[in-house]
Image (tube, rainbow, N blue to C red):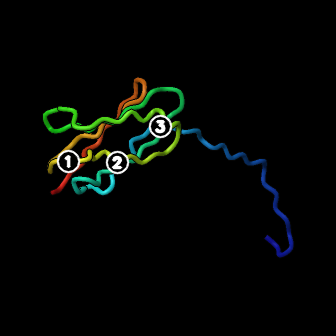
Amino acid sequence: MDEGSEVFAGEVWAVAEGPGFALEGMHPNPALSKELTVQFVSAPGAAARLELLDTAGRRVAEREVGSLGPGRHVVNMATGAGLAPGVYVVRFSQGARVETARAVVLN
């Protein structure tokens, strides 16, 4: 290119994606008993639920999160008394879609 010359490109479009569906992770992980927060992205139009399961598959905590609307959210899954130390599975479901991730809770 010579100094002072102009270069033109074709038309460019940027298309923003709408809210998707994702379980983005826990913070902190490992967590303390009252500090297990879960970050997720919910899609529009369907009920959504976060569940915290122990290693035996028992539901320890549950949150209906569909009322938060579509988009990125952060929810504390620790109950009022806190969680017992151990390994947990976080399950995020919306409609027919399900994602899971492991979380560790320390004393």
The residue lying toward the viewer, choosing from 16 and 4, is 16
The label nearer to you, 1 versus 3, is 1
The crowd level at tag 1 (other Cα within 10 Å; few <14, some 14-19, many 20+) is many
In the image, which disc is placed on residue 42? 3
- Report helix, strand or loop for mark 1: loop
* Residue found at the very far front of the displayed protein: 80
The image shows residue 13 at horizontal and vertical percentages of 72, 45
Alpha carbon of mark 3 to alpha carbon of mark 2: how far?
16 Å
Location of mark 2 (residue): 76
Answer left or right for 18 relative to 91: right
The image shows residue 98 at horizontal and vertical percentages of 36, 31
Answer left or right for 9 relative to 93: right
Question: Which of the 4 image quadrants contains residue 100?
Answer: top left
Question: Which of the 4 image quadrants contains residue 94?
Answer: top left
In the image, which disc is placed on residue 59? none
* Residue found at the very far top of the displayed protein: 96
The image shows residue 97 at horizontal and vertical percentages of 40, 28
Q: Earlier in the sequence, mark 3 or mark 2?
A: 3
Q: Earlier in the sequence, mark 1 or mark 3?
A: 3
Task: Please state which amino acid type lies under the numbered disc 2.
Answer: Asn
- Tell me: residue 27, above or below residue 69: below
Location of mark 1 (residue): 83
Task: Please state which amino acid type lies under the numbered disc 1.
Answer: Leu
Q: Which residue is rendered at x = 42% and y = 40% of the image?
A: 22
Q: Which residue is rendered at x = 26% and y = 45% of the image?
A: 79
